[in-house]
Amino acid sequence: MANAARREGQRVGTVGHPVYSALFPVPVVCFLGTLLTDFAYAKSGGNLLWLAFSSWLLLAGLLVGVTAALVLLGTWFAMHRCECHSAGLISCSSTPR
């Protein structure tokens, strides 16, 4: 099973696993936490502490999500060769560098 996770040419990461696979679950948990703290805010009668928790979880989810997306794009561009043509079109080959 460990061999199925390793692909040839996928060298960005630690111990054969890509970095973005560790970053992508964090925004999901933060957004679910935001939803739960919004419900807690509604049930608490307007306690501003829950509103602050929700804001911080939303900010953390957005920042880590953007970071994970940038790492994923960097990994994808590192593994594929993309060329710009004179017509403004971009073509990418599926063979890793």
Image (cartoon, helix red, strand yellow):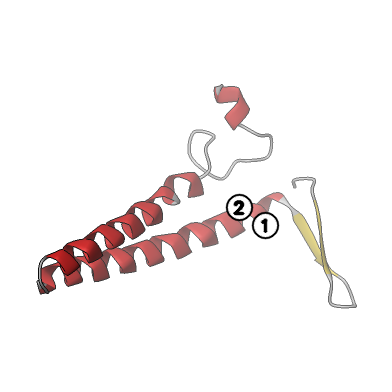
Q: Quadrant of residue 50?
A: bottom left
**Residue 54 location in percent, x, y?**
24, 67
User: Residue drawn 63% across and 41% down?
Assistant: 10
Callout 1 touching callout 2 (CB < 8 Å)? yes
Q: How many marks?
A: 2
- Looking at the rendered structure, the kind of residue marked 1 is Phe
The residue beneath circle 2 is 75
Compared across the picture, whether 61 is left or right of 86 comes to left
Observer-nearest residue: 44 or 24? 44
Q: Quadrant of the N terminus?
A: top right
Compared across the picture, whether 18 is left or right of 94 comes to left
User: Residue drawn 10% across and 71% down?
Assistant: 45
Q: Quadrant of residue 65?
A: bottom left
Which residue of the protein is positioned furthest toward the bottom in this rendering? 87
In the depicted structure, whether residue 67 falls above or below residue 78: below
**Residue 75 location in percent, x, y?**
60, 52
- Looking at the rendered structure, the kind of residue marked 2 is Thr
User: Residue drawn 88% across and 72% down?
Assistant: 85
Observer-nearest residue: 62 or 18? 62
The residue beneath circle 1 is 77
Q: Mark number for residue 9?
A: none
Observer-nearest residue: 23 or 50? 50
Which residue of the protein is positioned furthest toward the right in this rendering? 86
Which residue of the protein is positioned furthest toward the top in this rendering? 1
Q: CA distance from mark 1 to mark 2?
A: 6 Å
